[in-house]
Image: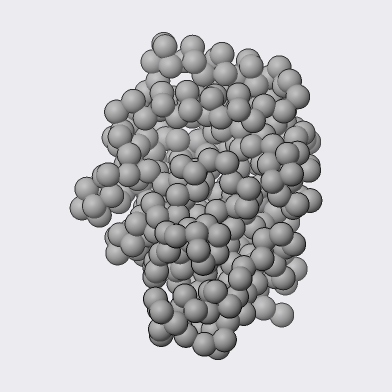
Amino acid sequence: MSLVDEARAVRPGEEVDVAKLEAFLRERAPEFAGPVTVSQFPGGHSNLTYLVTVGSRELVLRRPPFGNRVKSAHDMGREFRILSRLSAVFPKAPRALVYEEADAVLGAPFYLMERIRGLVLRGRALPQGVSLAASDLRALGLAVADTLAELHRVDVVKAELAELGRPEGYVERQVRGWIKRYADARPDDVPEMNEVEAWLQAALVAGVGATAPGLVHNDFKFDNLVLDAVAPTKIVGVLDWEMATYGEPMTDLGTALAYWTEATDPEEMRALPFGPTMLEGSLSRADFVVRWAEGSGREPVSLPFFHAFAHYRTAVVAAQIYWRYRHGHTKDARFAAFAPAVGILARAALRARDER
């Protein structure tokens, strides 16, 4: 049985025009010319990710979701430019190959990149065929923290990635922006979200600590990491760079912690499929922070704020995903279950707010 993350049949309503893709490859990437088969990776609720097979060769195709409302949130050209420069200084990023801006081929802009083969952990349990001792799970947690620290040591200017963002005022723009996004996608009233918003805005007025600006992945979690299938405590790839920017690395640490559920967390949080971080031997959130700080050389300032904001932001994403389903922009049945997650994550944000 293969432990490599495998693609599956394309979900209904998310099909790719194979004939047009074959013609595109013949013209723009002739080294990949030939009969094409397309399958789809199961993860992801934002941009869609496909496996394109040409004979024995494999490519990964990324395109925006069908029914996309927010162009800036699914900028394929920006993601392509990031990977084109990043892989030279951060080898765990996949190498970008070719980009198409016009809608004529697949109905939306898209790009192709190399495939990093390996194991991707999705959900609370380890996949069938994967067995990790408690010591292995601790080693894996340390490797995750080390990878985030490595990312935050990237010299953004040397990598010619400083144009990605404006560090000055970054955190305030993020908070204001996500509050606006929630207003646009608000489901039924969730009082806890209102409370989190008020606290975040008050914290901004009072002042939030900052570290030196750096590269920010903005969605750093287990199902965006590729593990070595033979030695799964080793991380060989980091995926999904669509939201990467030049800003405050503490937002990345907050995101990692928001997805790092512990066995002592409330049952409603433990039920979310965030990763195998509750298994015996797994690193605690506190130990993750210590390891990241050691590896990155950064002080984890204003941690309750960034942890709470990460939960709030994830709640907004859940609301946006449910909005797409409720308004008929996707037929993906997975999206129907996202409405309750908004309240669950808002309550998690309030708990993070109160941490010391």
Residue 97, percent across and down?
A: 39, 70
Residue 133, percent across and down?
A: 66, 62
Q: Who is closer to the viewer here, 254 or 202?
A: 202
Q: Is residue 82 above or below residue 56?
A: above
Instruction: Judge left or right: residue 274 versus residue 140.
Output: right
Residue at 62% across, 79% down = 37
Q: How many labels, in total?
A: 0
Q: Is residue 281 above or below residue 18?
A: above
Q: Is residue 200 above or below residue 228?
A: above
Residue 243 visible in the shown view: yes
Residue 124 visible in the shown view: no
Q: Quadrant of the N terminus?
A: bottom right
Residue 241, percent across and down?
A: 45, 53
Residue at 41% across, 11% down = 206
Residue at 71% across, 49% down = 330
Where residue 107 sits, quadrant-wise, is: bottom right
